[in-house]
Image (cartoon, rainbow, N blue to C red):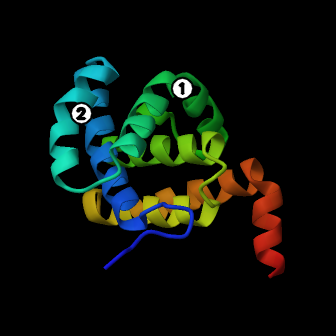
């Protein structure tokens, strides 16, 4: 069965790439290793899981390369310093922030829904509600035109 959309994107493979990116970003946050080392460590497993390897690499490198910018952009929407946010939720927020700010090809609702589902699967019991609140506010500002258009529908 072909899951690809007309634009060639496989949503299931992208979801898998996001889950693996979460694990890689989490490992990167804890270890302090270089992003390319973490990507190499996870890449071979990624390929076996029929995930979108290019998207996985973009997310991990994007978070690592833009960490300071992403953290500063998230700061107004957080109730504490980014380093005080649980490590899983922090990784989810950084990945979603990267997608919202640097991947306009991905609808903001997809970014938020994927972040919530990933936080539910890997995060603390109510971590997904925190992620949802932060990203709803961030998307309303960063993707205002898209968010306003969606509300009018």
- Residue 50 drawn at (x, y percent): 24, 56
The front one of 62 and 14 is: 14
**Numbered mark located on residue 121 in the image:** none
Instruction: State whether residue 90 is above or below residue 14.
Output: above
- Residue at (65%, 35%) from the top-left corner? 73
Q: 10 Å neighbourhood of mark 2: few (<14), some, or many (≥20)?
A: some
Are the residues tagged 2 and 1 within 8 Å (C-beta)? no
Q: Quadrant of residue 97?
A: top right
Q: Which residue is mark 1?
A: 66
Horizontally, is 95 left or right of 136 in the view? left
- Residue at (51%, 33%) from the top-left corner? 81
Instruction: State the SS at label 2.
Output: helix
Instruction: State whether residue 53 is above or below residue 143.
Output: above
How much space separates mark 2 and mark 1, taking CA atoms? 17 Å
Query: Which quadrant, please, contains the N terminus?
Result: bottom left
Q: Which residue is mark 2?
A: 27
Which mark is first along the chain, 1 or 2? 2
Q: Quadrant of residue 11?
A: bottom left
Horizontally, is 90 left or right of 98 in the view? left
Kindly tell me whether residue 41 is visible in this rendering. yes
- Residue at (34%, 60%) from the top-left corner? 13
Instruction: State the SS at label 1.
Output: loop
- Residue 4 drawn at (x, y percent): 43, 69
């Amino acid at each position: 069965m072909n899951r690809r959309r007309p634009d060639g994107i496989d949503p299931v493979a992208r979801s898998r790439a996001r889950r693996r990116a979460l694990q890689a970003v989490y490992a990167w946050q804890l270890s302090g290793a270089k992003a390319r080392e973490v990507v190499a460590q996870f890449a071979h497993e990624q390929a076996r899981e029929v995930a979108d390897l290019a998207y996985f690499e973009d997310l991990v490198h994007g978070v690592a390369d833009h960490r300071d910018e992403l953290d500063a952009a998230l700061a107004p929407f957080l109730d504490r310093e980014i380093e005080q946010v649980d490590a899983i939720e922090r990784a989810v927020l950084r990945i979603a922030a990267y997608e919202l700010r640097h991947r306009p090809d991905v609808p903001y609702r997809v970014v938020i829904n994927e972040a919530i589902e990933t936080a539910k699967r890997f995060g603390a019991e109510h971590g997904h509600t925190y992620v949802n609140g932060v990203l709803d506010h961030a998307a309303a500002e960063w993707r205002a035109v898209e968010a306003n258009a969606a509300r009018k529908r």
